[in-house]
Each structure stands twice: as C-alpha cells, then as structure tokens.
Amino acid sequence: MDEERNLYRELQLFLDRETLGFPETPSGSDIRLLTALFTPDEAKAVMHLTYKFSTLDEAYGRASKSDFAREELGRILDECAGKGLIAYKKQDGVKYYRTIHYLLGMAEGGLHGGKPKPEFLSAMNQYAKDGLFWKAFLNTKVPQMRTIPIEQSLTDQKQVATFDQVKELVLNSEGPYVIYECACRKGARLAQHPCKRTSRKETCMSLGKAAETIIEFGKGRQISQGEALEILAKNQEEGLVLQPSNTQAADFICSCCGCCCGIFRLHKVLPNPVKYWTTNYHAEVDPDACTACGTCVDICNVAAIELGEDDDFAKIDIKRCLGCGNCVAKCPADAIALVMKEQQVIPPMTGEDLNEVIMTNK
C-alpha cells in the first residue's frame, strides 16, 4: 500500500511540474483523484511523457529504465488516450502523445464515457473545494479560458478578428467535427442539479485533430460542418456562452452556462475575474434607452449585471463582463451594445503554442 501511495505521489509531483500544475492538498484529495483516474500501470506510463508531443520511441527512450517493454508502453498509452487522460494525435500514420491539464483535460476524461466512479466524483469535488488547483489555474501569463461574442451581438463583423467569430472558427477548420455531452452538465446532472439553461446534452464540440482522436476512441458523435453550425446557433439562442480553446485554430468550442460550469462558479466569487480571461469585448448599457426590464440580469451567466429596485437602468461590472453578447441579443429595448476593448488580445496559434507560453512563464 505504501509503495502504491508513493507511486501516486510521484505522479502528482510529476504533473505539478507540467503546464497548469497539479498541487498537493492537505486533505489528500489529490492522491484520491489520481487513484480514481489512473491504474498503477497508467500512472507509470504517463510519466514517460512531457507537455510536448512525443512518439512512442521518444517516450520509451526518455526513461533510463522503464517498467514496460516498448509495445506494452504503447498499449497503455493508447488506453490512457482512450480514457481522455493524455492528449493524442496521429499524423502520417505515426502516433504522438503528451500530458494534458487537469481541467479541460483529465477531469473531463473522468466524466466522459460511462457513469463516473463515485470515488472520482467525491475526490473531484473535494479537490475543487481545497482550492489550491484554482490558484495554479489562474496564475498563468496567458489564460486558458477565452470567451467570444455570440453572432447576434456583433454589429460590424468586418472589424472582428476571425478568431473571435464562432462561424469562422468552424469554417476555417478542415474538420472533422464531433459533438458530445458537456462534462460540466453531466456532473451537475449526476449530482441531481439539472441545467437551468438547456435540456440538451450534446452542446460542446471538438474540431480537427482533437476531433479525430475522439472519433478514434468512440467518445463523441461525428457531425457535418453544417450540423456543427446548427448546434452552435441553438446554443446561442438558448443563452449559452461560447468558449473556444484560447488559440486561433480552435481545438474545441464549449458552450457554457452559469449554473453548471465550474469555471463560471469560480468566476462569480473572484473580485476581478476578467483578469484571468481572454476576451476582447465588454457590454455597455445606454442609460437613456434602457427600460430596466431585467432581461439582461436573467440572461447573464456570470452575474455581471445588476438592477436594484431604485435603479433606472441596468449596470454592468466590466471587471466581470466576459463580452459574450447574450445580453445584447436578448435586450428588448436594444439598449446594450458590445464595446471592443482598446487593447486586443491575439491568442496563440495552436494548443502546443499555448502550452509553450504557459511553461515558459511557469
């Protein structure tokens, strides 16, 4: 038992040195979480990787002494990729592997597929409550989170960068496209807290190489480019927030809500949450046009809009506003508009570029 616990401690320390980190917690939730996610062999195999993509030969040669033969290591890494515990891609017939973050990575891997293990759900909830991971998550030079406006809120799309337009992200991808159940909504549903914004399960998608991996391991449903655009249109209509990967070439596009999304729950308790987000817009109210109906308050997923009993118009806290544009599209008085920030943020080109920036500044 001590030997196994030491193995998972070694894995925790290894992951903590990677990209966003995986901090140790006084409650022991870190070890319980890793034990629920990885078998002992998987824990050993993952430590052959880095945050950069490696071939099997590179991974096998990285350890001075491996517990596995080369072919066995490849089999175990494939199993980890199938469970969503590491990143994987195939290029020109060659397989590549790398570590991934805990959030927007391993956590979602634990939730996707069949019914998650009770011990995983318990450890995941405690790890979130312990709070140490959130500090690591937020203290990166380039945020992992990015919000882009919904299409109905953009009045002049000629001035909007393609990476801030959801339709362009889809059209510029060579595909394939995959849709799957939102991991956050699945977790909330299993905890008997169904989503208040949508009753649909399949709302989040992956594109390109990320989608190829999901298709190979049967973790999602392949759709056409047209279907992807239709689903995104429905997501926007229902007031979900568009959150693609913080890259110019999107690996995924999440459509998030304030009641289920764990990141949004964190957002609501931080004093200046937009500091940790990439967003090039914020909403602005025209006091003369606002009728104080409260529609914008109800549609906002991050509690960035207030309307007191004595207020004549809605007030937006730009320290909280993500610039998603839902309030703009739903305002019956057309009293809200999106304002482009003076300093535009250009995301890294790819996920590998994003990881490189995070590690350089770690």
Image (tube, helix red, strand yellow):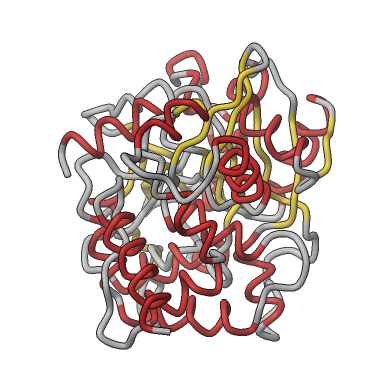
**Pick the front one: 153 or 220:** 220
Q: How many labels does the image show?
A: 0
Residue 361, image x and y in percent? 15, 39
User: In the image as oriented, which residue stretches furthest toward the left?
Assistant: 361
**Pick the front one: 230 or 20:** 20
**Pick the front one: 359 or 128:** 359
What quarter of the picture does the C terminus occupy?
A: top left
Q: In this view, does 94 lie to the left or right of 7?
A: right
Residue drawn at x 34%, y 32% as measured from the top left: 354
What quarter of the picture does the N terminus occupy?
A: bottom left
Can residue 83 be spotted in the picture? yes
Q: Is residue 34 above or below residue 225?
A: below
**Pick the front one: 19 or 11:** 11
Q: In this view, does 337 lie to the left or right of 257?
A: left
Residue 338, image x and y in percent? 42, 39
Q: In this view, does 254 lie to the left or right of 314?
A: right
Residue drawn at x 30%, y 44% as measured from the top left: 143
Residue drawn at x 68%, y 48% as measured from the top left: 82
Residue 114, image x and y in percent? 78, 66
Can residue 280 be spotted in the picture? no
Residue 74, image x and y in percent? 60, 38
Q: Is residue 121 above or below residue 170?
A: below
